[in-house]
Amino acid sequence: MGYTGRSDLGADLLMKSTAINVFQKQRLAGFTLIEILIVIVILGLLISLVAPTMFSKVASSKRKTAEAQMQMLSTALDTYRLDIGRYPAELEDLRKSDEAAWDGPYMPREIPADPWGNPYVYSLESDGELPYSLKSLGAGGLPGGEDEEEDVVFE
């Protein structure tokens, strides 16, 4: 029949080497805790460098949005004046009015709030060259303020 011990030894070695290879592959498949912590620290550093720049852009974009909305309101106010002969007493008159020559609505939707959620301040009294005053009170919602809380005045 021949020598059969050798084939059993070869099969036994083959099984052991396969088991070792499977174990090594499983061990190499994941990341260690140290590697994960290093990646988290690097991501934290990158975010701490980028975040302040991004948040400052948000504040300036809100200010520009307020200026654009006030320009739209100004156009509606001027159109109202052309039809009626005077500026409205309040911004809501751009949406509905009992005036005889009223040809509105002069705003397609409700009067928008400023980007900070506060109503725009409109008055027929003005210090500038416009016959009315239109402004946003900024993030604080109170007159005056500095930085993001500073008033945005339409000129």
Image (spheres, helix red, strand yellow):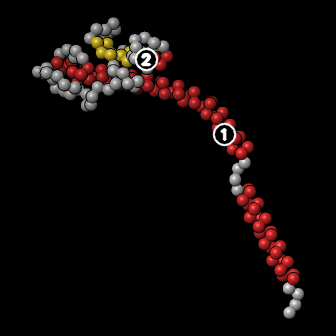
Instruction: In the displayed orientation, state which residue is furthest to the left.
Output: 100
The residue nearer to you, when weighing 102 against 19, is 19
Q: Mark 1 = which residue?
A: 40
Q: Distance between the residues labelled 1 and 2?
A: 36 Å
| Residue 105: assigned label | none
Percent x, y for residue 20? 79, 65
Q: Is residue 87 at least partly visible in the picture?
A: no
Residue 4 found in image quarter: bottom right
| 85 w.r.t. 20: above or below | above
Residue 145 found in image quarter: top left
The residue nearer to you, when weighing 3 against 88, is 3
Q: What element carries label 2?
A: loop
Q: Mark 2 = which residue?
A: 140
The crowding category of the residue bearing disc 2, from other C-alpha atoms within 10 Å (few below 14, some 14 to 19, many at least 20), is some
Q: In this view, does 114 lie to the left or right of 149?
A: left
Amino acid type shown at disc 1:
Ile
| 105 w.r.t. 129: above or below | below
Q: Is residue 28 left or right of residue 49?
A: right
Where is the C terminus found, in terms of image quarters?
A: top left
